[in-house]
Image (cartoon, rainbow, N blue to C red):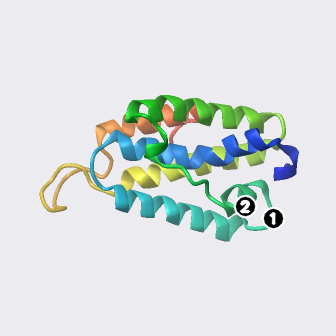
Amino acid sequence: MASKADFDALDWQTVIEGPALAGLIVITAQRGGTIRESVAMAKAYTEALEEHEGHDLLGEIVAKPPQIGPRDFSSAEDLHDRGLERIRSGVAALEGKATPEELEAYKRFTLTVAERAAEADKSGGVLGIGGERVSETESATLDEIAGALGIERSA
């Protein structure tokens, strides 16, 4: 079983940023809904903390969410490109130290954060009526995040 102590500071920072970056990439993929999407991400962290606190690697990862935001990047494209690369780097850092179960839990949690952000605000429609739960742009972005994680999205 891996823990924070198994990582150097840079690798740990990369690992803990992955889920938040995934959510931010989705938020910037589609205009609107930033507050709802941010709240949905926070709820995903809270739920994971309640489930994993104090007894596994994911509990350590979600214990203190990183302080990053879209303004830490020069543009949405920069966030997208560098964010996906950092997600890949986080997975690579975990691959050598985490158990297969811990790695899978991390990947699924990261994708869950992104999916929650995508589902938080309907796109299209008028005054919240109609529209789609996840836009085509958000869906394509979720596919890219899943690819960076090396997993498939569940339908």
Q: Are marks 1 and 2 in contact (CB under 8 Å)?
A: yes
At x 41%, y 43%, the residue is 26
95 or 76, nearer to the observer: 76
Amino acid under disc 1: His
Q: Residue tagged by mark 1?
A: 55
Q: Position of residue 150 (x, y in %)?
A: 61, 32
Q: Quadrant of residue 51?
A: bottom right
Residue under pointer 2: 59
Q: Is residue 151 left or right of residue 72?
A: right
Residue at 16% from the left image edge and 61% from the top image edge = 129
Quadrant position of the C terminus in the picture: top left
Residue at 74% x, 39% y is: 10
Question: The residue under label 2 is which amino acid type?
Answer: Gly
Above or below for 96 versus 55 = above
Instruction: Give SS at disc 2.
Output: helix
Q: Is residue 136 left or right of residue 148?
A: left
Residue at 75% x, 58% y is: 60
Question: With 23 as the anchor, is 128 left or right in this view?
Answer: left
